[in-house]
Amino acid sequence: MHKEENFQTVTLIAGDGIGPEVTAAACEVVLASGAQVIFEPVLAGMAAMEQTGTPLPKNVFQSIKKHHLVLKGPTQTPFGGDYRVRVEMENAQGQTEVRSHPSVAIALRKELSLYVNVRPIRNYPNVPSRYENIDLLIFRENSEDLYTGQERMIDANTAEAIKIITASATQRVTRFALDYMRRLNRQRLTVGHKANVMKMTDGLFLKTAMEVAKPYVDIQMEQRVVDALCMELVMKPESFDALLLPNLYGDIISDLAAGLVGGLGVAPGANIGADCAMFEAVHGSAPDIAGKDVANPMAAILSAVMMLRYIHQPQAADRIERALSRVLADKKDITRDLGGSVGTRQMTAAIIRALN
Ligand code: ATP
């Protein structure tokens, strides 16, 4: 039998800015760990725009529809202007229609129905941070809220955006969060919202989440107004177990939470749907440090570790985590943001050497 028959193919999007450097690091570490995966690279983002005229060419979806698994680097979204990501997709009636989205990441999450973004935030030994004992799971609703791209200029001085919250999307993300927590034996889920002001939209999110949670008697539900939640996260982050957030607050609070444990270089993430999953770090393309061999590859590597667990390859995932812990403990081969002085490539090579 050919060795690669049991291997899982992963669509690989290197992305923009530091994306190619950190995804190369993640792929090298995964392949060296003995994981049974093969990477199929496709081009998306600014590089695809330059080469093909579109940031999200058709072959990206063709590859993902075949393999159902993606490892993604950050893709850059230009500020302002009329930048839109247009994709040609088949609708329920089998007709081709053109749909447009504000960014590559949003287009992929939406078109692949990746309805939840899971972002584990925890302290890693020897990663400098202001806090200790943080072990927080963030569940961010991924498909609606203010991120559906329904924005317009009413006149030159007035703009509006539409915020959409549905009971069905809130139910599925809440169920996902509660089932995920049960598997990990987690006990308390805090819903973040602004239902005191956004009475209908956030009010529906809060009410629906609380209703869905009723049969989950083993998980304690709490709620916080999102501004107060931000303050509490900064004052006593270790007191939270898991957070459930609508899309916009989830985006913002994920970066805040990454800052609590050492910065964007250490925060991994997963976008999960019913039949497809895409793993990507919380950080963006960081153009300020791109191409300089200084980016921390940890977040991308830990996103790949989440992917290996998702495809039931826990031995390879454990090996990588152990190797990373050794490199962090040794403190010799760590990037600048972690208090070290080596580059992305040297840290990656050290992690590969530490695999056993
Ligand atoms: P984008 O527009 O794609 O979101 P950005 O620069 O606005 O990019 P991030 O990429 O999320 O936002 O990063 C913010 C800052 O955090 C970067 O400018 C960089 O200095 C730092 N940073 C992000 N990721 C890393 C990393 N992997 N290693 C080291 N520093 C990082």
Image (tube, rainbow, N blue to C red):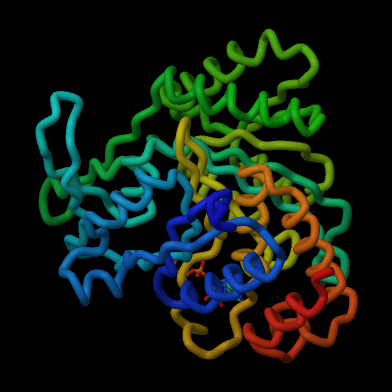
Say above or below: 265 vs 62.
below
Q: Decide which of 155, 79 is in the foreground and name it.
A: 79
The answer to which quarter of the image holds residue 164 is top left
Q: Residue at x 40, y 66 (%)?
A: 41
Q: Residue at x 39, y 36 (%)?
A: 113
The answer to which quarter of the image holds residue 261 is bottom right
Q: Please tell me how many numbered marks the rendered image carries.
A: 0
Say above or below: 151 vs 339.
above
Is 240 left, or right, of 197 in this rendering? Answer: right
Say above or below: 291 vs 100.
below
Outermost residue, top side:
215
Q: Residue at x 45, y 22 (%)?
A: 199
Q: Residue 124 at x, y = what percent?
A: 82, 62
Q: Residue 217 at x, y = what percent?
A: 77, 12
Q: Decide which of 118, 132 is in the foreground and name it.
A: 118
Q: Residue 241 at x, y = what percent?
A: 77, 37
Q: Residue at x 32, y 67 (%)?
A: 43
Q: Quadrant of the C terminus?
A: bottom right
Is 262 left, or right, of 296 in this rendering? Answer: right
Say above or below: 223 vs 281.
above
Q: Residue 29 at x, y = what percent?
A: 66, 70
